[in-house]
Image (tube, rainbow, N blue to C red):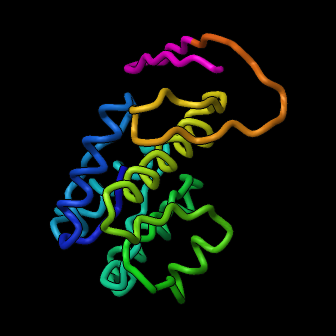
Amino acid sequence: MMSYEPGNQSFVHDVYEELKKEHIPVSKNKPLGDMNTFSKRAAEITNSLAICVIMTQAYQASELAEKELGFAHKEKIPLIPCLLTPDWKPTGWLALLTANLEQIVFQSSDPMSRAESMNELVNHIRVTILRVPAFQFPEGTLGNPKTITGTTEIIMKVSIKMPNAHFQAEWL
């Protein structure tokens, strides 16, 4: 699930499409301003594996965002903070809820930098949320691949099947 302000719908749509291409289970909900009922949003949060928080100044100023993330925190739903505004850091309630979490920074409009941030988000979701072993994704998946941690050179082919997802990769 993604939590965001209406002004970021285009960015959220792009992230949603990339996650779908990478076989990451993702739901595209309505932005905070379009929320019909609190019970419907509570059910969406409770049924989420994690929440991608698209952090901006407008998001932080939203009382609905504060309620939504407060509820997610109470329900122990993992948060994935994505910083979208250049030269800005969250304060107050948003800083408190995201202080000890790895932030994915999407602050540049440069396509290569955005691709690297998207690759970081995909890797973070796979390893931290879906518990898929870390490995180097093939070149061209989302720009340049991330480096595997460690010093041993490994050649291995991995095929992982999960409900609603299947992907393969080679370690070299």
Left or right of residue 88, residue 57 in this image:
left
- On whether residue 143 falls in the magenta region, the answer is no
Horizontal and vertical percent position of residue 126: 54, 36
Question: Is 30 rendered above or below residue 55?
Answer: above
The overriding secondary structure of the stretch rendered in magenta is strand
- Residue 87 position, x and y percent, is 45, 86
In this rendering, position of residue 73 left or right of residue 41 = right
- Name the quarter where the C terminus is drawn: top right
> 25 or 107: which is nearer to us?
107
Across and down, in percent, residue 93 comes to 53, 83
Q: Which residues are magenta?
A: 159-172
Which residue is at 50% across, 83% downward? 90
In front: 80, or 170? 170
Q: Residue at x 19, y 73 (%)?
A: 7
Residue 11 located left or right of residue 138: left
On the image, the x and y values in percent for residue 108 come to 37, 69
Q: Is residue 106 above or below residue 12?
A: below
Residue at screen point 56% across, 53% down: 78
Q: Is residue 150 above or below residue 83?
A: above
Q: How many marks?
A: 0
| Quarter-of-image position of residue 67 | bottom left
In front here: 3 or 7? Answer: 7
Residue at coordinates 26% horizontally, 57% vertically from top-left?
A: 12
Furthest-right residue in this view: 151
